[in-house]
């Protein structure tokens, strides 16, 4: 029905796919900063041959949170689309039920 809604759904689905592929450009700016900071700590600990459990856990949390947000955005966009379709169907049904008599 609405091109903007279709574009929002496509953009949200694309962002979710990029997050699932672990493409860091799909993260928000704040999440990118957190991700690269944690990755830097993890690499530094790896060079020193120390475990980096906290940094690795932070990286996993960043990806999990970003995926949850992207899934919520996609679900919300799909709900808006469904509401638009239902409203259009109701409008058309109301229009057809009115006869000339």
Image (cartoon, grey):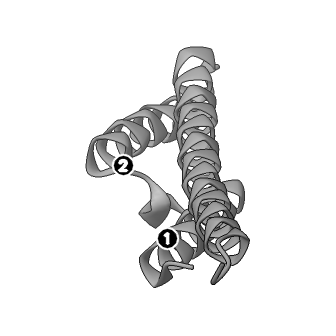
Q: Quadrant of residue 53?
A: top right
SS for callout 1: helix
**Labels in figure, total:** 2
- Location of mark 1 (residue): 5
Could you say which is closer to the camera, residue 63 or residue 56? 63
Residue at 56% in and 76% down: 6
Residue at 61% in and 22% down: 57
Mark 2 closeness class: few <14, some 14–19, many ≥20 residues within 10 Å: some
- Location of mark 2 (residue): 32
Residue at 42% in and 77% down: 4
Could you say which is closer to the camera, residue 74 or residue 51? 74
Q: Position of residue 11 (x, y in %)?
A: 52, 72
* Image: 49 above or below 22: above
Residue 62 visible within the image: yes
Q: Quadrant of residue 51?
A: top right
Specify whether 39 is left or right of 36: right
Residue at 58% in and 67% down: 91
Q: Position of residue 67 (x, y in %)?
A: 62, 43
Q: Position of residue 77 (x, y in %)?
A: 55, 56
The quadrant of the rendering that contains the N terminus is bottom right
Q: Quadrant of residue 20?
A: bottom right
Q: Which mark is residue 42?
A: none
* Image: 86 above or below 41: below
Q: How far is the residue under mark 2 from the one under mark 1?
A: 27 Å
Mark 1 closeness class: few <14, some 14–19, many ≥20 residues within 10 Å: some
Residue 22 visible within the image: no
């Amino acid at each position: 029905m609405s091109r903007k809604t279709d574009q929002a759904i496509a953009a949200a689905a694309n962002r979710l796919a990029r997050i699932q592929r672990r493409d860091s450009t799909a993260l928000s700016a704040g999440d990118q900063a957190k991700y690269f900071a944690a990755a830097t700590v993890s690499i530094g600990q790896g060079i020193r041959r120390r475990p980096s459990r906290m940094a690795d856990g932070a990286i996993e949390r960043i990806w999990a949170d970003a995926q949850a947000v992207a899934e919520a955005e996609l679900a919300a966009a799909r709900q808006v689309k469904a509401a638009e379709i239902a409203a259009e169907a109701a409008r058309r049904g109301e229009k057809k039920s009115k006869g000339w008599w």
